[in-house]
Amino acid sequence: MLRAQDLKITFNAGTPIETRALRGLSLDIPSGQFVTVIGSNGAGKSTFLNAVSGDLPVDSGRIEINDADVTREPVWQRAGRVARVFQDPMAGTCEDLTIEENMALAQLRGARRGLGRAVKASMREGFRERLATLGLGLESRLTDRIGLLSGGQRQAVSLLMAALQPSRILLLDEHTAALDPRTADFVLQLTARIVAENRLTTMMVTHSMRQALDVGERTVMLHQGQVVLDVSGDQRKGMDVPDLLAMFERVRGEKLSDDALLLG
Amino acid sequence: MSLFSLLGALEIGLIFSLVALGVLISFRLLRFPDLTVDGSFPLGGAVAATLISGGVDPFTATLAATAAGAVAGLVTGWLNVRLRIMDLLASILMMIALYSVNLRIMGKPNVPLITEPTVFTILQPDWLSDYVARPLILVGVVIVVKLALDWFLATQTGLAMRATGSNGRMARAQGVNTGAMILAGMALSNALVGLAGALFAQTQGGSDISMGIGTIVIGLAAVIVGESILPSRKLVLATLAVILGAIVYRFFIALALNSDFIGLQAQDLNLVTAVLVTIALVIPMMKRRLLGKKGA
């Protein structure tokens, strides 16, 4: 469960280029829910995600994960509660380490790291099984450096790694945006499967309205650092991109003019 | 080249292979350009020589020198992690500071160890002459250090340390306290350099304030030479490679200095080092260009 209350973040405060990225954003995500977050450029999607992960400190407001206040915890301390897949496929894995070393690193997310062997023989079987579910043939390449893999393969492994350890919330940061359409589709389907299998509380930020409505069970739209639309259940079923746009215009009294958002 | 100078080169090469392992940790694994070693190497020598000449048991003195190196590395890491001073600058500050610290420790520019016992005189069997015994003892030390380092880097903490250097953001997202890892890695790296300094002082008959000049370049040279002799992403081989690199490098230096026809003298050592490192850095680039690939 995630509870974000009245989050405010301002960049370059007090200068001519002051940007109020989050202006009192509040959002509750109950346990096990898969929420997609959309919004045009500058709406605050990434800022919000980075605030939840701990990459960006908030100026004010409160972030709770399963009733624990994590507002002031640095990234590494929250990592036990938050799993994350980055937009850049290179960012979520260590290219100098092997596939099994990357997975071993993720297996201990949020746990104490001692002087036991990082990669144990007993762990390899589990890694192989999970990698086999990808259907990419990676199960026979455990000791290959992950830098040898393609962007899509690395993103798929990142997803597996995020689900290796039970986390309270999974953050997906436009994680298909840097992939070609076919690979993006594959990673998206994989996402839906992994989220469903592990019943993960998930927040997926995306640029594409289509994608936002296709996956998950609830869609939230951000605009100027606040939540402006929040649709789920029957209202969301059968909803199409134009419906969402019309709804936005009704609520805001203005037209959305972001090509990326409309064409995506 | 005589057997005598050959064994001498092996001896110094083995000592510098400890420096090279330290440089491997900072430059390669943590990606932290650390010049502290120019100060922590003579620091190790100063601590060991001062303690030994003060009557302390050489093993304890060597251990203390190793610990002193670790503290120096910790301070550099702390300047970078907590005070957010740029990594290179933090290490330069520490290097400069250590010059004064080393003079304070010794109380004079050099502390001779001619008649005092050293770890080498204690371990040396009666039937073996010192110029054979010293390299043999050092081989043992280097093997133990290498195996211990290999073991550590394969542990959960070691893996977290490698991830910190490779992709800090990812490491943090996996719950690694990257700041602590940098501190620990810098301490480990400079502990090895401090140990090398202590052993160097005990083989060379004393500690000298200027014995640290160029340590980092020699360490880097060893790493680069090692990587070109034995290019491998496997850590067990990478640690072996830098050890071989340090030894091979010393042989080349000895060869250059011993060949009368080149006309080089001992004071040309640092120039030769700089030239060799430059060549070693340029060769991979030339290779790429010749192969028609884009330069990095």
Image (spheres, rainbow, N blue to C red):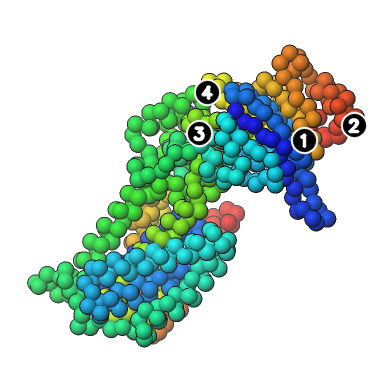
Precedes in sequence: disc 2 or disc 3: 3
Residue tagged by mark 2? A254
Check whether the beta carbons of the residues at disc 1 and disc 2 lie within 8 A of each other.
no
Q: Are marks 1 and 4 on the same chain?
A: yes
Can you tell which mark lies on residue B188?
none
Residue tagged by mark 4? A198
Residue appearing at x 61%, y 35% in the figure: A64
Residue A119 at x, y = what percent?
38, 39
The secondary structure type at the circle numbered 3 is helix
Q: CA distance from mark 4 to mark 2?
A: 40 Å
State which quadrant residue A253 falls in.
top right
Q: CA distance from mark 1 to mark 4?
A: 30 Å
Residue B99 at x, y = what percent?
44, 78
Which subunit holds the residue at mark 1?
A: A
Question: Which mark is nearer the camera, 3 or 4?
Answer: 4
- Quadrant for the C terminus of chain A in the image: top right
Residue A174 lies, with reference to residue B235, above or below; the image says above
Check whether the beta carbons of the residues at disc 4 and disc 2 lie within 8 A of each other.
no
Residue tagged by mark 3? A161
How crowded is the residue under tag 1: few (<14 C-alpha within 10 Å), some, or many (20+)?
Answer: many
